[in-house]
Image (tube, helix red, strand yellow):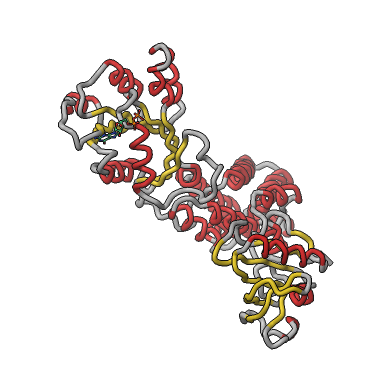
Amino acid sequence: MTHTIAALATPPLSGAIGIIRVSGSRTPELLNAVFAENKRLPAESWKPRVMMMGKVLADGEALDAGMAVRMVAPYSYTGEDMAELFMHGSIPALRAVLEALYKAGAVPAKPGEFTKRAFLHGKLSLSQAEAVADLVSAETRDAARNAAGQLDGKVEKVFSAAYDALSGLIAQYYAAVDYPEEDIDGGTPAEALQGVLDSLEALLTTLGKGLLLREGLRCSILGKPNVGKSSLLNAFAGYERAIVSPYPGTTRDTLEETVSLGGVKLRLTDGAGIRDTRDTIEEAGVARARSAAESAELLFVVLDGSEELTKEDRAALDLARDRQSLVLINKSDLPQRMEREQLEAAFLHVIPVSAKTGDGLDSVDSTLRRLFDGGATLYDGSVLTNERQAGAIRRTMDAVRNALSGLRDGVTHDAVLAELERALASIGELTGRRVREEIIDEIFARFCVGK
Ligand code: GDP
């Protein structure tokens, strides 16, 4: 019998409400230790999945008025007996209640342990459990929608179909090793394998978009001092407020700012090099800007439209030539002295903007949308975002290809079977039907406590 776990399910911040989760067979008894229902009904007698009002207790002392709900196995997130306790979001009070639960015999939940239990009880497949982590950490709406679709089983269906096809074939081989060319579901083994290959290939080709969705695009802002790079960075950050993590300390302590623009997640960095040329000799500054530009997938070159083009501007523009880049002529609110025609002849995307008034930011948005097909791809869960899954898909495809060429070359049944078994093992890592303990541990370690 596993122990009963408890943890705070909401972030450890003060807020309107705080939720404590409990899961395991001792749930009702533990709930009674920290919650007195208004009519004194013991948790064992509550109707499942009905909110009960009462007093929240710690060491017999009423700390808060709150609500509690009880779920009975297997009808819960984890598949075990579970409870959720809703209190006001007071950190000391929540902590006191957690302590009381631990004193009464609950064990602090490890990161992802609730979801891990859901997986172990067959409530979620492994790819669905991974989608939970993706959903929680999603930074754009597309990323959230895609994770939700995966949680709903969109990629899982592809994995399960491949798993079933392979295990069906393997069974067939074991049963009738002497007649490998006999029809299987109206087709030959080669057709069935090609079908598996095609479906996995189609999923794998979405990975590029998935990683863009998840990791975002590294984008460097180049330009000489005072053209308005920092102002633009702030303007972008403020343009679409659907941004980034609400917790401090993730990316904010560097010069990087993550913004969602044109449907893409951009990881904007101020191209340190050229900005610093006032303090260093110009050569060194440009060299550093060059290396910042080289590691970026997209460049914004910022110019001051109220001035004429200078040597430093040209240095920045040179770095952007032949690269995926946008030239932003800033300070469009001031009288313009910049030669736009010349720039437009050399660069595909030249956009007048004003960090001050916000003018032109919508053009930047729509240009990015066009460039990176923001909005065109349906992020409904059919886009692969997970490198672990991609790795297992590649290994599966590899083995399936070997099996196929083995079939074609007429190798022994045993040789084909060995490849099919290898393919099944790899795809089993995706569904979770054949997964090693350490892979499971690694996956759930990515989660936060309480999830
Ligand atoms: P950076 O050195 O390139 O990062 O430039 P800053 O963002 O620090 O801006 C330099 C100066 O230009 C500041 O005084 C800003 O207020 C001003 N500035 C930036 N963008 C605009 C703009 O669009 N219009 C106007 N009028 N001033 C701007």
Give the tally of numbered discs. Answer: 0
Q: Is 173 situated above or below 317?
A: below
In the image, taking residue 247 as reference, residue 418 lies left or right, namely right
Picture residue at 30% right of the left edge, 28% below the top:
227
Q: Is 253 situated above or below 222?
A: below
Q: Please identify the quadrant where the C terminus is shown.
A: bottom right
Q: Is 142 situated above or below 304?
A: below
Picture residue at 64% right of the left edge, 43% below the top:
399
In the image, taking residue 305 as reference, residue 4 lies left or right, namely right
Q: Camera-side residue: 58 or 177?
A: 58
Picture quadrant of residue 405: top right
In the image, taking residue 404 as reference, residue 239 lies left or right, namely left
Residue 404 placement (x, y as % from top left): 60, 45
Picture quadrant of residue 264: top left
Picture residue at 48% right of the left edge, 51% below the top:
383
Q: Please identify the quadrant where the N terminus is shown.
A: bottom right
Picture quadrant of residue 237: top left
Q: Camera-side residue: 45 or 211?
A: 45
Residue 343 placement (x, y as % from top left): 21, 26
Residue 325 placement (x, y as % from top left): 33, 31
Answer whether residue 81 is visible to the viewer in this image: no
| Ligand 1 - quadrant of the structure image | top left
Answer whether residue 13 is visible to the viewer in this image: yes
**Residue at the extreme bottom of the image, as rendered:** 39
Residue 273 placement (x, y as % from top left): 42, 21
Q: Camera-side residue: 389 or 227?
A: 227
